[in-house]
């Protein structure tokens, strides 16, 4: 039995090490780099204006509970992006918080 364990040990080590590769938080497509901020404070559901919108509907968490309003949508956008700027200009969004690479906005429902 001991012989079999020694015989398969190198194969097992190789398989285990293969699964330990670091997963990047960036992906490259063409000449652009897309950074995916991670954030445990926000529960992001879907794009706000369309399915591919960088600004996303944000749900209730311990962090966001004080910002929820029944007359407004809570929306989070990557901080400093064009999507956030257009959200403010188009919908009168009001910034309420920042966390983990996102700015959180209250967007009045019209």
Image (cartoon, grey):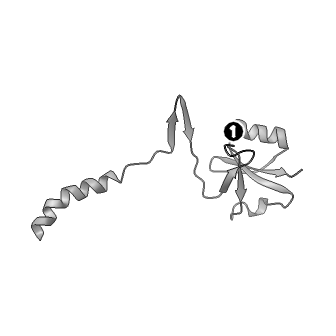
Query: Which one is in front, 60 or 98?
Result: 60
**From what the image shows, is residue 101 above or below residue 65?**
above
Image side of residue 13 versus residue 104, left or right? left
Looking at this rendering, what residue extends furthest in the front direction? 51
Q: Name the residue under label 1.
A: 80
Image side of residue 35 versus residue 24, left or right? right
Image side of residue 15 versus residue 2, left or right? right
**From what the image shows, is residue 107 above or below residue 41?**
above
| Image x and y of residue 47, in percent | 70, 48
- The quarter of the picture where the N terminus appears is bottom left
- Residue occupying the point 62% across, 50% down: 100
Looking at this rendering, what residue extends furthest in the right direction? 110
Query: Which one is in front, 53 or 10?
Result: 53
Looking at this rendering, what residue extends furthest in the left direction? 3
| Image x and y of residue 16, in percent | 30, 57
Q: Quadrant of residue 5?
A: bottom left
- Residue occupying the point 24% across, 56% down: 13
Looking at this rendering, what residue extends furthest in the bottom direction? 1
- Residue occupying the point 84% across, 61% down: 70
- Residue occupying the point 57% across, 45% down: 36
């Amino acid at each position: 039995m001991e012989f079999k364990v020694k015989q398969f040990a190198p194969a097992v080590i190789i398989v285990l090490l293969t699964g330990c590769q670091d997963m990047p938080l960036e992906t490259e497509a063409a000449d652009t780099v897309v950074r995916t901020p991670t954030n445990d404070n926000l529960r992001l559901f879907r794009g706000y204006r369309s399915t591919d919108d960088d600004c996303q509907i944000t749900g209730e968490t311990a962090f966001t509970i004080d910002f929820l309003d029944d007359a407004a949508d809570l929306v989070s956008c990557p901080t400093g992006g064009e999507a956030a700027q257009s959200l403010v200009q188009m919908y009168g969004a009001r910034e309420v918080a920042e966390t983990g690479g996102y700015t959180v906005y209250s967007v009045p429902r019209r």
